[in-house]
Image: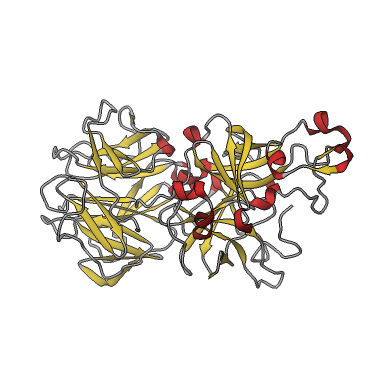
Amino acid sequence: MTSEGDLQSLCARSSRLQDVERYDGNFGVPTAFVNRHRRAVGLLRWKSDLVDRYRDEAGNVKGQGWCTGTLIDDDLFLTAGHCLDPSNTGSWKLPHEKGGVELRPAELAREFVVQFRYEVSPDSDAPNSVNSADVLRLEEYRTEGLDYAILRLSGNPGMQNGKTRISPRDAQPGARIAILQHPAAAPMKVGAGTVARLRGSTLTYDTIDTLGGSSGAGILDAETGKLVGVHTNGGCTKTAGGENSGVTIRALTAVSPILQRLVDRSKDFLVGDWDNDGLGDLAVFNDGCLYPDANHDGAPDWGSKVCPAEARADQYFVGNWQPGGPSQLGWRRGNCLYLDTNPNLPLCFDAPFELLVADWNDDGRSDLGIRKGSCIDFDTDLDGVLDNQGYCYGEGMAEDEYLVGNWDGSSHASIAVRRGTSVFFDLDRDGRTDGAPRVYGYGGEEDQYLVGDWNGDRRSDLAVRRGTLCLMNHDAESGLADEGRVYRDFWSEP
């Protein structure tokens, strides 16, 4: 039912997609990224009672999975416009009014439900779906000919599943992107790669496979998780040429009043002690430089911005590379890490891995923790060699997120894993959970979980970010916010 014609959607001889429940990190985006963003992805499926209502004109699509889409607000769902085109396509016959009169897109829209978390079970290949919502009406459709549609859903499913933020800018060639999708209406899968080209309102990619049913899937920036486009077309060929493609977010926001209103110019925050006063401070990395807010007034500190040697890295991270001093930056390019103290020395490890920075050996300096699956090994002398065997905790890719901190005030760091709103701690690093979990925030609905010493008691605590507001929890037992810091959106474009 897609507009892909006879072109292929698989960019290789076999599909390079993985079930989201079994994703192992091999596509270059962390498992935490997939776990965080899959909740807002839905499968557009025809209602199962079409025959009861349309009888001989019901067509043959009842109950058929059709397209992918993304929650962009509590009750708004973004997908491809051709998913609501009224003409029959290939072997599919759509419902019609009496006499074979085609339904208009707005009428077709109300014949769908959206299934969220339609995924394979972790223990079997059997698919399951966590929740669903009816389509109430069509809000926008193919404005100025662009291939997109915005649907209004019942029940505010974004309050349960979260929503995807809208990027203010397009992803550039070479930028890493990910697509969470329902290829051929199958349980959700993930593919990741890089942008190949920008051509007007189109961005292309030749390393991410798609199939019919992938149409409408959000194209996510792999660094911020923001939506930078909507997948619409297959273009790879049987000879491994060509490119799959979608419509760019800048083209969409230029014509859509709804998307214009929802553009999110905020950045993910970094936490460090930027003025060496013992308190965790917020900072944002933007346009090649770090902007700290060490005095907690909600604005970048005058004269304190830090511009590292690498302005366009895959990831930025924070550490105390020199004992007794303020926090400093590091960055990642591929499987190599670089530190501000020696930016020309790459520290490379076998991919895939997730980086966890902390003082792992009690020497007052941050070290590198390299997590693969559920096990973490350490580079404590920062030479690119794993010189200290680590330990294993949690369920690896099955966890929502790994966090690290000095949770009990001791001199060494330890691991915690977040499962929804609960955080489980291994304080003595023996691979077993210690004590009761802490419950804080709204789990996958939060924009970001942060760790820092917010009140100077030498204990790490949690915070959650909601837009530009960070809610800090000083008291580990209460699960309540003790402080709210707003870091003003100074990085917005005019």
Image spot of residue 336 (x, y percent): 36, 66
Residue 120 visible in the picture: no
Count of numbered badges drawn on the protein:
0
Residue 71 is left or right of residue 87, and the answer is left
Vertical placement of residue 333 versus 222, above or below: below
Residue at x 65%, y 51% (from the top left corner): 81
Picture quarter containing residue 5? bottom right
Vertical placement of residue 121 versus 252, above or below: above
Picture quarter containing residue 230? bottom right
Residue at x 61%, y 35% (from the top left corner): 129
Residue at x 22%, y 70% (from the top left corner): 342
Vertical placement of residue 55 versus 490, above or below: above
Residue 482 is left or right of residue 375, and the answer is left
Image spot of residue 87 (x, y percent): 78, 50
Q: Nearer the viewer, residue 41 or 86?
A: 86
Q: Nearer the viewer, residue 191 or 89?
A: 89
Image spot of residue 245 (x, y percent): 60, 63
Q: Nearer the viewer, residue 127 or 347?
A: 127
The figure's colour scheme reads secondary structure
Of the 4 image quadrants, the one containing the C terminus is bottom left
Residue 471 visible in the picture: yes
Vertical placement of residue 492 versus 385, above or below: above
Q: Nearer the viewer, residue 19 or 46?
A: 46
